[in-house]
Amino acid sequence: MDDDDVQAKAIEDKLNSQLLQLELEHTIFERMVYKNKNKNQHWRCSYFQYLLKVRRDIKLFRAANMEEVLRPCFHVISVRGTKQKLHVPER
């Protein structure tokens, strides 16, 4: 394995670990918002409305199934034969 392959593997591992961390934090966040949604006397306040917006955005992010989106990217990055060089003309 050369240096590029090692870097690509490191990026893939880091993104996978961050996706797992997001799943864990999402679970905690869901429990916190769900627990307070019906009991919270300030549910109309801006901070709680912001939490609900974050909750919605996380659900949309999860619905996009980022793991499935990123998997082909990792394949393209890690395959040696498909590397292309970009030539930018100089002025």
Image: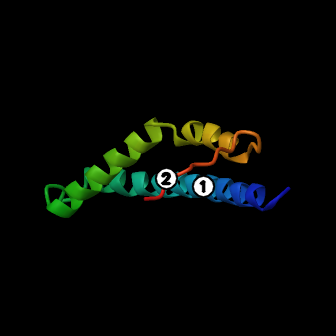
Callout 1–callout 2 Cβ contact below 8 Å: no
Q: Secondary structure at mark 1?
A: helix
Front position in the image: 56 or 67: 67
First reached walking from the N terminus: tag 1 or tag 2: 1
Of residue 73 and residue 69, the one placed in the foreground of this image is 73
Q: Position of residue 87 (x, y in %)?
A: 56, 50
The residue that appears at 14% across and 55% down in the rendered structure is 44
Quadrant for residue 75, please give it: top right
Label 1: how many residues lie within 10 Å, few (<14), some (14-19) or many (20+)?
Answer: some
Question: Is residue 36 left or right of 45 when viewed as pictured?
Answer: right
Residue 53 is marked as none
Residue visible at 82% across and 58% down?
Answer: 2
Give the number of the disc on residue 15. Answer: 1
Taking the image as shown, residue 30 lies to the left or right of residue 19, namely left
Q: Residue at x 70, y 55 (%)?
A: 8
Task: State the quadrant of the N terminus.
Answer: bottom right
As shown in the figure, which amino acid type bears the numbered disc 2?
Pro
Residue 52 % position (x, y): 27, 51
**Which residue does the image show at 58% across and 42% down from the upper left?**
70
Instruction: Identify whether 25 is placed above or below 59.
Output: below
Depth-wise, is mark 1 or mark 2 nearer the camera? Answer: 2
Q: Label 2: few (<14), some or many (≥20) within 10 Å?
A: few
Locate residue 51 relative to residue 80 in the image: left or right.
left
Residue located beneath label 2 in the image: 89
Residue 18 locus on image (x, y percent):
57, 58
Quadrant including the C terminus: bottom left
Tag 1: amino acid: Leu
Inter-mark Cα distance, 1 to 2: 33 Å
